[in-house]
Amino acid sequence: MTDFLLDPRLAADSAFIADGPLSQVRLMDDTRFPWLLLVPRVTGASEWLELDGAQQRLLLAEVNRAGNLVRALPGVEKLNIGALGNIVRQLHVHLVGRHAGDAAWPGPVWGSGTAQRHAPEALATQVEFWRSRLQ
């Protein structure tokens, strides 16, 4: 896992929060949704099936932990979990908190409108918020 490189599109659209046992935990830079990304630090992985059993179990545990944190936020009624990979091939898992009436409801967040970026100070505050919750 030492030669892990993050896809430049993921880097441009998200902010680093922390390293989990397997994955980088990142915050999508879109104020419309509480939205975390888990990016396994496994070189060349583009599909869940390319992870070995131990890696799959670690990723599942990370999804459960991060997903429960998103679900616990005020106003979150539904947790969307997705690993599409049609545009960014690098394996990554989206965890998006949703509620009736949000900017994309009831459709998927992907391709729905334009991301509303955090102001730099607000992004730093959100990263610290998530970092403290993940400890």
Image: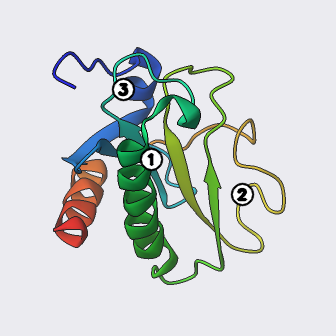
Which badge, 2 or 3, comes first in the chain's sequence?
Answer: 3
Which badge, 3 or 1, comes first in the chain's sequence?
Answer: 3
Measure the alpha-carbon separation of dots 1 and 2: 32 Å
In front here: 71 or 89?
A: 89
Residue 120 visible (yes or no): no
Query: Three-letter amino acid code at disc 1?
Result: Gln
User: Pointer 3 and pointer 1: residues touching (CB < 8 Å)?
Assistant: no
- In the rendered view, tell whether residue 93 sits above or below residue 107: above
- In the rendered view, tell whether residue 129 sits above or below residue 30: below
Closer to the camera: disc 2 or disc 3? Answer: 3
Q: Position of residue 132 (x, y in %)?
A: 17, 68
Q: Quadrant of residue 61?
A: bottom left
User: Pointer 2 and pointer 3: residues touching (CB < 8 Å)?
Assistant: no
Closer to the camera: disc 3 or disc 1? Answer: 1
Q: Secondary structure at mark 1?
A: helix
Q: Residue furthest right?
A: 106
Is residue 123 shown left or right of residue 112? left
Mark 1, residue position: 56
Q: Secondary structure at mark 2?
A: loop
Q: Residue at x 56, y 19 (%)?
A: 89
